[in-house]
Structure formats: C-alpha cells, structure tokens
Amino acid sequence: MANRNGIGWTAAVGSAIALMLGMILGQVIPAQAAPPTNSVVVTNTPLPVTGDVQVTGDVVVSGATDAVPVLPSAPFTDSVSLLDNDAGTVSIPQTQMGVTSMTVTNFDTIPHQVRVFRPLVSGTDCDPADIIGGAAPSFNVLVGARSTLHLPFPTAMVFSRIGAVTCLATQVMTAQTSAVEVVFNGLGD
C-alpha cells in the first residue's frame, strides 16, 4: 500500500523511525540517498579546451577519438647531388622526418623531372645502392633548365621510419648531362 506521495508505508515508517532515532542520538541519518541524476553531454566542442576542467565521478568515452600527431622537434637540413640518374638519399636518426621545404636546383641545359619518395631499403641504412622500392609519400616535380624551384610545405610532409631507418630518396627521372641538387629542410622527432 502506498501513501499519496507514492512511498510505500513500510518505507515511510522506516524513514520516520530513522529520522526520530537520529534526533534522539543527535545525528542526522539520511533515510535513503537518491541516485545522481546529473549528466553532461559535450558535442561539437572546438579544440583545444583551455583552462582548468574538473571532472568528478566516472567518465565514459564512446565512439572514435582521433589521435593528434606530434610535430617532430629536431631541425635538420640535408642535400643530395644527383648525377647520371642515380638515386640519392637523406637520412636522420629520428623515427620520422617532417619536411617543411625543398629546394631543387637544375644545373643542366634541359628541364628535369625529379621524383621524391620514401625508399624501401634492403640494408640497415639509407644507402642508395640498397633501395629496392618506394612507398608513399611520393611525388614528382618538374624543374626548368638552369633554374631553381623552392617548395615550402606549411604542413610538414612526414616520412616515417621503415624498418631500422628513416630516410627519403630523390631521383632524376629524365636523361641528364649535368647535376641536379635537392636540399631538404625540416624537423625530426
């Protein structure tokens, strides 16, 4: 049987007894704690969130969360001189290199196509003789005769480690009679 507030007689009597006992003993004894009903849902929040954020209780994350890549922090500059259509490589000891700019100088009297790629190597270093293939990122640039082409990458182009080494390779893809030089600037982690 329930009273007009929807509380059963047994629960109402139990609450009254607990209240009276608490008054006699000089203590407040809660009859029954109600479960928390507050919940917060945050959606479409622009990041980053700044300031102090306090969270009490359990936090449940559902759905996918995107990892934020860390920008490499050790600066590097390296160059490769390419002759006779051989490949040249640039390597750093870090696990990835983020190229922020590339400058290609063509000393030849004809235009050249220069390929830049992440090499697959058979050895433990970036020796051009050990290149057995290529992987992404990979792209080609055309450089005019006796000219210099500078390419800035506002968002660094990242070359990750393959096996024991982190390197990138360049190769002139057209017949050449003079040198082509490629200079890379960037950051390693």
Image (tube, rainbow, N blue to C red):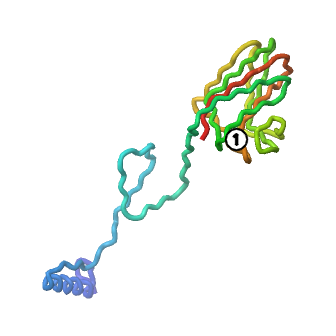
Quarter of the image where one finds residue 108: top right
Q: Is residue 166 left or right of residue 108?
A: left
* Viewer-proximal residue among 63 and 140: 140
Q: For the residue labelled by badge 1, is the local secondary structure a helix, a strand or a loop?
A: strand
Where is residue 10? Give x, y as percent. 26, 88
- Residue 53 or residue 119, whichever sits in front: 119
Locate residue 17: give its quadrant.
bottom left
Instruction: List x then y, in percent, for residue 146.
Output: 75, 12
- Image quadrant for the N terminus? bottom left
> In what quadrant of the picture does the C terminus appear?
top right
In the image, taking residue 33 as reference, residue 25 lies left or right, namely left
Left or right: residue 149 versus residue 70 is: right
Looking at the picture, does residue 125 appear above or below residue 170? below
Q: Which residue is mark 1?
A: 166
Q: The disc labelled 1 sits on which kind of residue? A: Thr
Camera-side residue: 136 or 122?
122
Q: What residue is drawn where x is 34% and y is 62%?
A: 38
The image position of residue 112, as x and y in percent, is 79, 20
Residue 9: x and y, percent? 25, 86
> Which residue is painted at 69% across and 44% down in the image?
161
Q: Could you classify mark 1 by the number of other residues whose Cα lies within 10 Å: few (under 14), some (14-19), or many (20 or more)?
A: many
Q: Quadrant of residue 13?
A: bottom left
* Looking at the image, residue 41 lies above or below residue 116: below
* Residue 119 in the image: above or below residue 107: below
Q: Residue at x 22, y 79 (%)?
A: 29
Residue at x-position 44% and y-position 50%? 43
Q: Is residue 169 above or below residue 110?
A: below
In front: 136, or 127? 127
